[in-house]
Amino acid sequence: MTDESQSGQTNRSSDPQFRQALNESARLLSANRPGEAVRILETLLKDHPHNPDIAINLGGALILQRKWNRAVTVLESAVKQHPDNVMLWSNLGAAYLGRLETAGPKQQERAISAYERAVQLDPNAPNVHYHLGLIHKERGSLERAYAHFQRASEVNPADRDARYWIDRLGEMLAEQVRQRNQDPEDEEGNAA
């Protein structure tokens, strides 16, 4: 029994009109038309407030529009109802983060927590390790970033962006090791 039928509402998620509207919203999102998708999804959410698919799509559409706070509101409500839904946690991580370049430490921490919850639920969740890698890279945690990009590449071997960061961070980490190994010699040479 679904949440909707338990609350006295009929379960209309198998209703062809409901499915058609949800599929249309997904098509609009794929066509990069999130504003149109939001209009459909907000109507659906009013009629089906406990449906996680609606929240996932609506949260994603709001994220695409950079309406982070509205996305957080929708997604936080949904994860309370569906705490084991990986996609809700993944989208919530993106909503918490907003734009990586302008995200402060608090936003980053909230995003990391949401993404880590998604990984706990599904270690192979698509794109989650990649996003964790980006956040840790931005924070200067190069080893952690490298590990997440490695995992992203394992989850999706075709992820060229993850491969790029693995190569780039590998070079940066190797340079750090070379510098550490050279520093003691330089200090000895300066002391003589």
Image: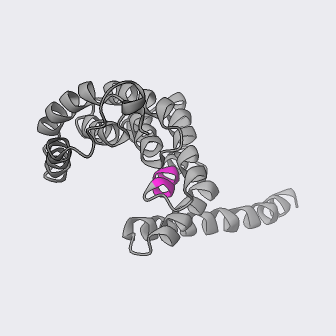
162 in relation to 83, above or below = below
Residue positioned most to the right: 192
> Residue 154: percent from the left, percent from the top?
52, 71
Residue positioned most to the bottom: 157
Q: Quadrant of the N terminus?
A: top left
Q: Main secondary structure of the magenta part?
A: helix
Report the residue at 21% width, 34% height from top: 41
153 in relation to 16, above or below = below
Q: Which residues are magenta?
A: 128-134
Report the residue at 74% width, 66% height from top: 182
Q: Nearer the viewer, residue 20 or 25?
A: 20
186 in relation to 63, above or below = below
> Residue 192: percent from the left, percent from the top?
88, 61
Query: Is residue 131 within the magenta segment?
Result: yes
> Residue 64: percent from the left, percent from the top?
25, 40
119 in relation to 183, above or below = above
Q: Quadrant of residue 178?
A: bottom right
